[in-house]
Amino acid sequence: MIEQQYIDLFETYREVIDQNATEGLNKERDAAFEAFKKWGFPTSKLEDYKQSDISRAFDADLGLNLRNIPIPVNPYDAFKCDVPHLNAHVFFLINDRYYDKTQPDLPLSNGVFVGSLQTFSEKYPRSFSMYYNKIAAADNGVTAYNTMFAQDGFVVYVPENTVVEKPLQLINILRGGVNLNVNRRILLIAEKNADVKLLICDHTVDDVNFVVTQVTEMVAGENAQVEFYELEENSVKVTRISSLYCLQKEQSKVTAAGITLHNGYTRNDYRFRLSGEYAETHVGGLVISDKEQHTDNFAFLDHAVPHCTSNELFKYVLQEKSTGVFCGRILVEKGAQKTEAYQSNRNLCSSEDAHMYAKPQLEIYADDVKCSHGLTTGQLDEDALFYMQARGIPEEEARMLLMVAFTKDVVDMIHIDILHDRLEYLIDKRFRGELLRCGNCNVCK
Amino acid sequence: MENLLEIKNLHVSVEGKEILKGIDLAIKKGEIHAIMGPNGSGKSTLASVIVGNSRFNVTQGSIFFNGKNLLEMKPEDRAREGIFLSFQYPVEIPGVSMVNFMRAAVNEHRKYRGEDPISASDFLKLMRDKREMLGIDSQLVNRSVNEGFSGGEKKKNEIFQMAMLNPKLSILDETDSGLDIDALRIVATGVNKLHTKDDAVIVITHYQRLLDYIKPDVVHVLYNGKIIKTAGPELALELEENGYESLINNAME
Ligand SMILES: Nc1ncnc2c1ncn2[C@@H]1O[C@H](COP(=O)(O)OP(=O)(O)OP(=O)(O)O)[C@@H](O)[C@H]1O
Ligand SMILES: [Mg+2]
């Protein structure tokens, strides 16, 4: 059993884990341990993980940096951000630890906390215990695993009626001399009428295997506005298992978009619960993959109350031997009348060895709703290609332009202009195979 | 004078079915040729083969352009050699803006000639000039290529692209269909303005109306994959009057 070594590890090192974390974090471990023992890592025997056997990633010799041995790094040197000039407040997590050696250009607005999860748990114990591990599912093995081992992470807390003008940017850096398991935790709280934008960039520096679990808990209070973007540019040796749990109250509006620009093996869960009327959710996903990359996006939109709207758009461009998986589940609970839920999944497979597995699932228990889903997997439009060639654009270039065009509507979901334009540029470079050939990282290896 | 375009004994099939059955056609610089003929006779097929649509198989014959063997060239090279097709059914390309599309096309033409990319300001000026010449709304060029364009707008957009690329041989495949009376006049005037003694035009049409503006030197009738008659501009008028029937009957004998 793959789980056994982690169960043993947890029991043996429990004290070390606790000593290098805070009481707030430690309080959650026992229950998580029980849950993990019950559920284990998800395997492909489970319907929701059919194409992505998470347990396999853990069947390896991975180190955990439980003693928080500092990894020498100056993130500003190690990482030349791919989204520069964002004019954002920039923060770093080195593996699963908040990097506090550099101070971003604070101050932020009154009452806003952005920083280490440990610090937050000690400075704001009430808020911490109100939200930490409250939104995440109790019955998911990998989330439980994360809770068992999580020792730090990143928090954005925006109190009532507060607007954070500048976007926040969190840069996750993976560093290590040996194969590592990293368990990262993120908490984003936007209270009533709050407004905040967070961009998370995932980056690998060292050429070892990483298995990363990331659990993000997000609460959008009444009438809060949250934009949450993730840009993954990891090396092929990274397994990323990310679970976003979002709870939305009435009239809140959340836009979440995940861009997988370069990766190894990725599983992203987007789990939204619309629990207040007139809440609105926009979820986007864009995957560009080649080699033997694997990307699985799982979206679950739970419409618990009437008058909510959700909109999903997931697009994949799969080249070479890469695999894409999309499962989009929409649940309209009993009584959630006037729900509007739309889902669209469009995929391009540009090679015979590329595979897309897509599964829309609509479960509707209310009668007065508008729900739809659309799914297409195909190749580039040959007529469009020829039309462009007939204007003198070489075939390769025409393909490139069409692929970039294909990604456009997902990129357009991003409302930070600089990020939007920068992404267009990065996507173009990605298709040209020129991404990050700058010597700053291992992504191109 | 040497022929700009020279097609000899061209046979073309698609999915095993022969569509063009031995076409001979020679066009000199400065000339305007009209090709007419009933639906399904092979006019668009001929145009597609000239520009290099690989859907069609050339089973026999040759096409030379400016002394170069076209059949050995990729579509993009044919375009950059100066061949332009105004498509009967222009293609919509969502997500690719007209501006980026045209900039790419113009620069690819320049690159082919060994020139540097066009400067941003020259490009915008070129776009504006050609747009104004053809009475094209400025909004249109900011949208995705042909996406959601009306039938007439698509046709105008084809001629706009032709004006931008300044081809040596333009093939207009039913560019008149879908254009309103004013647009037809504007487009035809545009084509005439662009036409010089150094380039040639092939006009594929069903109607005399367009030929009132763009006056052909030669008119061909294509029927069932063959050119069954070639004559002067009076042929078009005759066909308008009497239809294809007697011509076809004569050809059958
Ligand atoms: N891809 C294809 N597969 C099968 N048949 C085709 C294909 N393309 C064209 N054809 C057939 O070839 C014949 C000639 O078609 P073409 O489009 O060249 O006619 P046309 O003269 O341009 O007609 P129209 O005046 O209606 O535009 C038609 O019978 C058409 O159905
Ligand atoms: Mg035709």
Image (cartoon, rainbow, N blue to C red):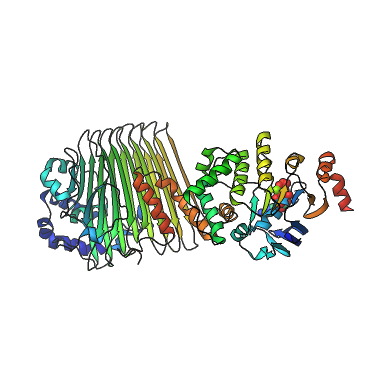
For residue A248, side relative to residue A326 (left or right): left
How many circles with numbers are drawn on the protein?
A: 0
For residue B15, side relative to residue A170 (left or right): right
Question: Which of the 4 quarters of the picture holds residue B189?
Answer: top right
The x, y position of residue B157, in whole percent, is 59, 43
Quadrant in which the N terminus of chain A appears = bottom left
The x, y position of residue B161, in whole percent, is 59, 48
Q: Residue at x 87, y 49 (%)?
A: B249
Of residue A236 and residue A278, the one placed in the foreground of this image is A236
Q: Which residue is drawn at 27% across and 51% down?
A: A140
The x, y position of residue B153, in whole percent, is 60, 39
Q: From where the camera sits, is residue A37 visible?
A: no
Compared to residue A77, the image places residue B98 above or below, namely above
Q: Which residue is drawn at 12% across and 54% down?
A: A21
Of residue A52 and residue B7, the one placed in the foreground of this image is B7
Q: From where the camera sits, is residue A255 visible?
A: yes
Quadrant in which the C terminus of chain A appears = bottom left
Compared to residue A288, the image places residue A341 above or below, namely above
The x, y position of residue A185, in whole percent, is 22, 51
For residue A286, side relative to residue A273 (left or right): right
